Image (cartoon, rainbow, N blue to C red):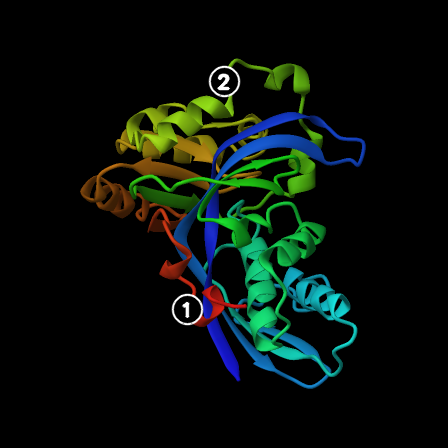
Amino acid sequence: MKLVFKTPAKINLGLFILGKRPDGYHDLETLFQMVSLYDTVELESLENQIELVCDDPKVPTDESNLMIRAARLLQEAVPEKTGLGCRMVLKKKIPMGAGLGGGSGNAAGVLMGLNRLWDLKLKPAQLSKIAARLGSDIPFFLCAPSALGQGRGERLTPLQPPKKFYVILVFPRVSLATAEVYQALNFDLTKNSKNIKILREFFSQSNIISLGAHLHNDLEPIVIKRLPVVESIKGKLRSLSAAGTLVSGSGSTVFGIFEDSKAAEQAFARCREEDWDTFLTETVSSFSEFMPEDLLNYP
């Protein structure tokens, strides 16, 4: 049996860092949204072995990869089942180290896919618990296309997706380490009157213009300081009539949101003239847009 499915990218429409936790992580509030840039994952049963191959040579295929770690944790979750193994093939389109959650989405897809392939019958809550052990963003990709994330980002409240809007993703082909960005946080500077409630309100109203005007990421000043090209990208998107621009997560991708598809297409064409990786996407409203029915309806 072989399973083939897609895993999406995400953007953070808002990211507010509330403080540092005793465990070294940060308490935060974030507004997650899936967008229509996808990797493709193929899973096939393999006796007692776990293998990963990828068409991007920069992607590690050893035990450091979240996909392999996800498979290992599933094996541990069902010790009574023996002989479990798989061959995973990953076809990348989401840039690595871009703040778009590509690796996290891949891992979440593996949890869903192997649950079906190995017929484990684990419930969504069980998969989410395993996902939280792998990384803070991973439970989101099992939850909903739009969600409020709290705690480390793993405490999730699904949100009703707004009407579709258009998102241009611009990756300047340079990455930053997430840990490095968080370590540079100055909490005296991140205190401000903005909060996630305002974003949620405009999001729920599908008020894309006001949403764009209130996009906020406490990590963005750090990313801009380390990568000045980010400010150039933001300026370019603003000049092309984006409703708002922001660094996604810990960067280095910048996104611009557009209410109108024609404006987004014109801006995309102009951004492609630059020496950046640029993608025109739209917001995802349902898992059915990228996941096959047999995965969505299992168990």
Image quadrant of residue 204? top left
Q: Alpha carbon of mark 1 to alpha carbon of mark 2: how far?
A: 40 Å
Chain-order first, disc 1 or disc 2:
2
The residue drawn where x is 76% and y is 81% is: 82
Q: Look at the picture and state if 39 lies above or below 215.
A: below
Q: Is residue 140 above or below residue 117?
A: above
Q: Which residue is pictured at 44% across the width and 48% down the height?
A: 145
Location of the C terminus (image quadrant)? bottom right
Image position, residue 118 (x, y; %): 62, 77
Q: Nearer the viewer, residue 189 or 196?
A: 196
Residue 157: give x, y in percent of width and height: 53, 39
Towards the viewer: 133 or 187 = 133
Secondary structure category for the residue under label 1: helix
Q: Quadrant of residue 122?
A: bottom right
Q: Which residue is mark 1?
A: 293
Three-letter amino acid code at disc 1? Answer: Glu
Hey, what amino acid is under mark 2?
Lys
Q: Which residue is mark 2?
A: 194
Neighbourhood count class around disc 1 (C-alpha, 10 Å): few under 14, some 14–19, many 20 upward: few
| 218 lies left or right of 51 | left
Going by the image, does 181 lie left or right of 283? Answer: right
